[in-house]
Image (cartoon, rainbow, N blue to C red):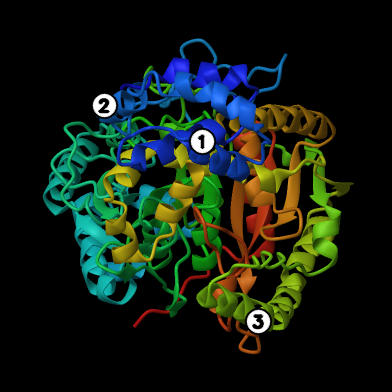
Amino acid sequence: MSLDRRRFLTVCSQFGFASTLLPGVLYAAATKAEDKRITSEMVTEAAVIAGVPVAPDQIAAMLSILNSNRKSFDDLRALDIPNSVPPAFIFDPMPPGQKPTPPPPGANHRTPLSISPANAFANREVPKDLNDLAFCTVRELGELLRRKKVSSLDLTQMYIARLKKYDPLLHFVVTITEERALAHAKAADKEIAAGKYRGVLHGIPWGGKDLLAVKGYPTTWGAGGFENQTFDEDAEVVKRLDAAGAVLIAKLSLGSLAQGDKWFGNRQTRNPWNPEQGSSGSSAGPGSATSAGCVGFAIGSETTGSISGPSTRCGVSGLRPTFGFVPRTGAMTLAWTLDKLGPLCRSVEDCALVMQAIWGPDGQDECCKDAWFQWNAEYDWKKLRIGYLKDDFEKPWIQPAPSLADDATPEEKQAYERRKAGEPAILAAREYDRKFDLAALEVLRNKMGVQLIPVAFPDFPYDAMRGIINAEAAAAFDSLTLTGRDQLLSDASGSSWPNTWRAARLYPAVEYIQTMRVRELAIRAFAKLFDQVDVIVTPTSGPSNQVSVTNQTGHLAVIVPNGIRGKDAPATPAFAGPGGGGGAGNQGGGPDTPVSITFLGALFKDAETCAFAHAYQQAAGFLKLHPQLA
């Protein structure tokens, strides 16, 4: 007998079960049975899992119909659906009645920029050892290239040599694209010499998170089983940076399928400030390589903290753009309604300069909006209304340990006890870090003259929205779950995706839709919040859980280094650091490591928010900090 999916679900709905777990649980149980038949015992057990009472007479009435057809789920699973195929819906973070500012007529990515003036550095002689330029900003390197004081080829060779030197320590390289890089660098030098200067990124070496497709090179997604995967076309962001004249020199590490900082081959990308720490994830390589002065800038991605976490841990500036500002075509999908691509750089202005090259629709990513980004280093940020999450600055915070189930395994009980025992150390580390957050408020008020407006996030069950990423990721990689190939991930990297995806198969479709409806309510409430302020200053980590919240609402974030912990800083237990799709915040801790502050902006107000964050970075004085590597 075959099972037609529509008839199967129709039967369930006739008995009032369409909005529950029961249909999926029941079908899964039946497919494991030897004779592939649904029995009354299966219905009873599935009903218990679903939390739905089912009377015996209802079960008897259902059985003959449920067993009449048994085929369509198998037919769907037999299809080979590439990761690049989206579902037939488009997520839009804009509430009703609002639209992003469109580009002016005739404007494009090459519209002239207002960038910061060339400083004295650009006029000095180039050092004999080009490693002395390794930590220069894009703005500085671009000026040296424009003035022909250094060649793109020399910079490219210098950065490739540094990648090779420090990768054994930091594990941030998956593939060095050396042949491609040298060819593009030589072409850049030839164009610049001929007066065909494309702009500030022309000739700048950069690295991309290895979920961006690059023709002629593996695109591994950081995962076991995908080490030799290739694509026939470059990702759109790669194409746009090529057009700007930037030089791709490496595909940089990411946690397995964009989770954490551990990737295939049992590697873990390391923090250049403290190589005994991981670099956080999942944009692990972009954060680490940028921090270590091994690329001019990098492109990462974020679903729930994957730019914020590495930017904080590695002490670099990061821009998570508004959802729908940068096309994701040619990038691995983790969650269609959450994924974003953005730069990790040595300064906020660098982030804006890179953003200038990659924003805007491409005709392929249907979520990408026809919005407008125009960097202006001279923007009058004093006209912006600045809010701050007052409660998040006032006390240290720790996320409660998850409750322990009655039937927990011995391993789960041990992990729980370790977590509880470590909470005092976490609180001590958070209290230590709070002085950096409070110092940021002093800079804003006393040095910049900002009148801070206390605000709070709208009250919604944001933690309950976690099911969205789990369900979407489970669908994106469903073939791994069904074939058992997910074991390649856990064996190689310790990834928890496999268990998350198995659990997600019990996440009801109706609950997903209900969660998205609550998400829409949160988006509308945030629109009212940003009617009151233009930018919100927040600790990167705090009780409002701003990283998770604003990823759900699609808002942009600029993460800015905010100081270095002293030698008296307490260490944070390893298990307290970022997890999940990336995590964020000042977790990690320990002496001589960086902290960050975060600036949130209204939807598609990325340029204005960057202008304010740039002003803060200049005032706070943490722009030139970088790790000391041997």
Of the pair 75 and 235, the residue shown nearer to us: 75
Q: Is residue 116 visible?
A: no
Q: In the figure, is residue 250 to the left or right of 534?
A: left
Q: In the figure, is residue 199 to the left or right of 412?
A: left
Q: Residue furthest top?
A: 105
The kind of secondary structure element at disc 1 is: helix
Mark 2 and mark 3: span between their CA atoms?
47 Å
Earlier along the polypeptide chain: callout 1 or callout 3? 1
Q: Which residue is mark 2?
A: 79
Earlier along the polypeptide chain: callout 2 or callout 3? 2
In the rendered image, residue 217, in percent from the top left (x then y), is placed at 16, 46
- Residue at point 70%, 78% (across, down): 423
Q: Which residue is mark 3?
A: 422
Q: Is residue 328 visible?
A: yes
Depicted 445 relative to depicted 200: above or below: below
Q: Image quadrant for the N terminus? A: top left
In the rendered image, residue 85, in percent from the top left (x then y), is placed at 34, 26
Q: Residues within 10 Å of mark 1 (few under 14, many from 20)?
A: some
The kind of secondary structure element at disc 3 is: helix
Mark 1 and mark 3: span between their CA atoms?
47 Å
- Residue at point 24%, 39% (across, down): 192
Mark 1 and mark 2: span between their CA atoms?
31 Å
Q: Image quadrant for the C terminus? A: bottom left
Of the pair 265 and 414, the residue shown nearer to us: 414
Q: Which image quarter: residue 54? A: top right
Depicted 241 relative to depicted 137: above or below: above
Of the pair 31 and 484, the residue shown nearer to us: 31
> Is there a contact, CB below 8 Å, between mark 1 and mark 3?
no
Q: Residue flagged by tag 1: what amino acid is it?
A: Ser
Q: Which residue is mark 1?
A: 40
Q: Residues within 10 Å of mark 2 (few under 14, many from 20)?
A: few
Earlier along the polypeptide chain: callout 1 or callout 2? 1
